[in-house]
Amino acid sequence: MATQFFMPVQNIIGAGALAQAMDAIAALGLKKALIVTDGGLSKMGVADQIGGLLKEKGIDYAVFDQVQPNPTVNNVNAGLAKLKESSADCVISLGGGSSHDAAKAIAIVAANGGKIEDYEGLDKSKKPQIPLVAINTTAGTASEMTRFTIITDETRHVKMAIVDKHVTPLLSVNEPALMEGMPAPLTAATGMDALTHAVEAYVSTAASPITDAVAVKAIELIARYLPTAVSDPKNKEAREQMAYAQFMAGMAFNNASLGYVHAMAHQLGGFYDLPHGVCNALLLPHVERFNQQAAKARLDEIGAILGKNNPDLAGLDVIDAITKLARIVGIPKSLKELGVKEEDFDVLAENSLKDVCGFTNPIQANKEQIIGIFRAAFDPA
């Protein structure tokens, strides 16, 4: 069966990536950029730092810094209004997954019209978004290089999965120096998000030799470097290797897609406004225990890779290895700790089964089985 492979045309990764990226941005012939970011990075001066570098290249800029975690439809609408007001001809996303997702949503609606809700699902747009450059500051979501955009519809309390080749950025930038300021909990959550991307892509029904190769390498690097990145945030080697790891995990899932971990985590994020990476980390061992019915050989391979690259995980099966890694980096132990309520499992499960990310899970579940997975993650033994 023929497969397709999606990623940005140009990707710059490693020490010095930001300076090199400015030359690449200048070559695009853009006049004014809307920098889409969050309030924290704006207050720290990072948005204006990037703006200053753009000015040196003759590109004017404006800043939209209202992106919130789990960006919403209202977030996107406010960004669109700012884009129109500023007369910007391109968008630069600065931050982690939330900033990139919001920027993609702004850029696709700006080019195609309508509202972001029109693009939920697979390839609903008719033409490419306005030019988008993604400058990444976290090592986890890989949203800077994927065709996935996740936006919360606050009316329905649902995270919309928008999977569209036209939201892929023109250029992705991963400068490890921009990641050194990530606090330990964010480093842990985004790192476990990257692990989930690689694992789900490796057991996906749409996996290919290309996605397998990058998924395996990502798992190796995450097992080896994530604990160090969490415990020693200024460790340049760990930061750089995690930047590569999350990017390769993104290459894997951008093309093999995902599974029920993400389909379920999206509902938790949309319903309770919870951190996406933490939800993934809590659900991952329980979903993969369910998946052992259909993907045991591949999951056993993942367990061996984790153990080979981290002595603390050696000798453990894949479920125990994932669980222990989450404990090492300080992930909460249960959904109950996060305030999830058992009485919501029915609607959460129902919405999970509608999420496009679950369509490539190695075994298809019914609602009762999804509820069972939520229950297992709610209060693990």
Image: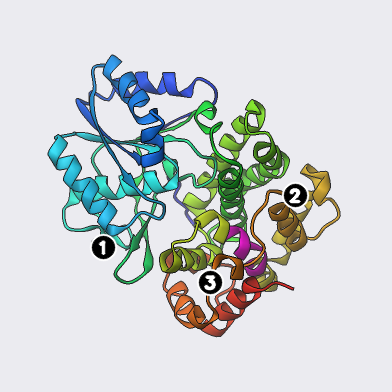
In the rendered image, residue 322, in percent from the top left (x then y), is placed at 71, 57
Q: Which residue in the structure is indicated by mark 3?
A: 340
Dividing the picture into quarters, in which one does residue 35 lie? top left
Q: Which residue in the structure is indicated by mark 1?
A: 117
Residue 171 can be seen, yes or no: no
Colouring: rainbow
Residue 372 located left or right of residue 42: right
Of residues 328 and 295, the one drawn nearer to the viewer in this rendering: 328
Q: Tell me if mark 3 has few (under 14), some (14-19) or many (20+) residues whose alpha carbon lies within 10 angstroms of its own.
A: some
| Numbered range of the magenta stretch | 280-287
Asked whether the residues under the numbered discs 1 and 3 touch, taking CB atoms below 8 Å apart as contact, a structural biologist would say no
In the rendered image, residue 29, in percent from the top left (x then y), is placed at 23, 23
Q: Residue at x 47, y 76 (%)?
A: 348
Q: Which residue in the structure is indicated by mark 2?
A: 306
Instruction: Determine the residue located farthest toward the front in the rendered image.
Output: 43
Asked whether the residues under the numbered discs 3 and 2 touch, taking CB atoms below 8 Å apart as contact, a structural biologist would say no
Mark 1 vs mark 3: in front: 3
Of residues 300 and 378, the one drawn nearer to the viewer in this rendering: 378
Instruction: Report how far apart the C-alphas of labels 1 and 3 lie in the structure.
Output: 26 Å
